[in-house]
Amino acid sequence: MKKEYLLVDGYNIIFAWEDLKKLCEYSLEDARDKLISILSNYQGAKGIELIIVFDAHRVKGNKGSIEKIGKTYIVYTKEAETADNYIERITKDLVKNYIVKVATSDRLEQIIIMGSGAIRVSATELRADIRFTAKKVSKKIEEIKPIKNNMLFDNLDAKTAEWFEKMRQNKNMK
């Protein structure tokens, strides 16, 4: 099975999700940080490679940068390069060897990346999958959560508990 990459047009997603869009009214940096946090958790649950791309093309003299937070790559594009340009370029390289999904609600960008062989994911679809994945993770945690207290006997299978009980009673163990 091929490794999967998710490329995210950061500002496109921020302005497509109401909670992050509202947060931008107070702090664009906080909205970016919250998106990175949400997507990093999603990445961990899905076991995918994640690249979040933010436009910095209007910043004079900006040479662009790539930073790694945990297993997540955060890209700030260079002057005169949009997030769309970066995503299109990297998609063409990655689709040769990997499954590539691009999260954006920009219709033109979706058409371009699908033409390159990538899978488009709208902001709405991404949000829905994040929520679905979070519910699955919560359910899994509930399943492995200790039954009662965190006492040894509360979490043993029946056979092992019986063995310990016999040992406790100094009975002959077989």
Image: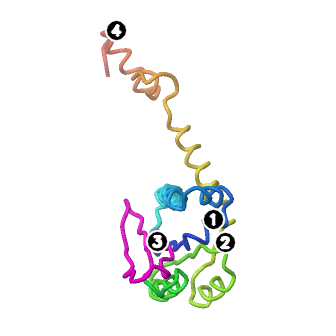
Q: Who is closer to the viewer here, 110 or 174?
A: 110
Sequence order check, earlier mark of 3 and 1: 3
* Secondary structure of residue under mark 1: helix
Mark nearer the N terminus (1 vs 4): 1
- In this view of the protein, which residue sits in the foreground, 109 or 22? 22
Region of the chain picked out in magenta, as a range: 50-78
Task: Determine crowd level at label 3: few under 14, some 14-19, many 20+ residues with C-alpha closer than 10 A.
Answer: many
Q: Earlier in the sequence, mark 3 or mark 2?
A: 3
Q: Earlier in the sequence, mark 2 or mark 4?
A: 2
Q: What residue is disc 2 on?
A: 122
Residue shown at the point (55%, 37%) measured from the top left = 142
Check if residue 66 falls in the magenta segment: yes
Measured in 3D between alpha carbons, the distance from the residue under mark 3 to the one under mark 1, in whole angstroms, is 14 Å
Question: As displayed, is residue 60 above or below residue 150?
Answer: below
Pointer 1: what residue?
Answer: 126
Where residue 64 sits, quadrant-wise, is bottom left
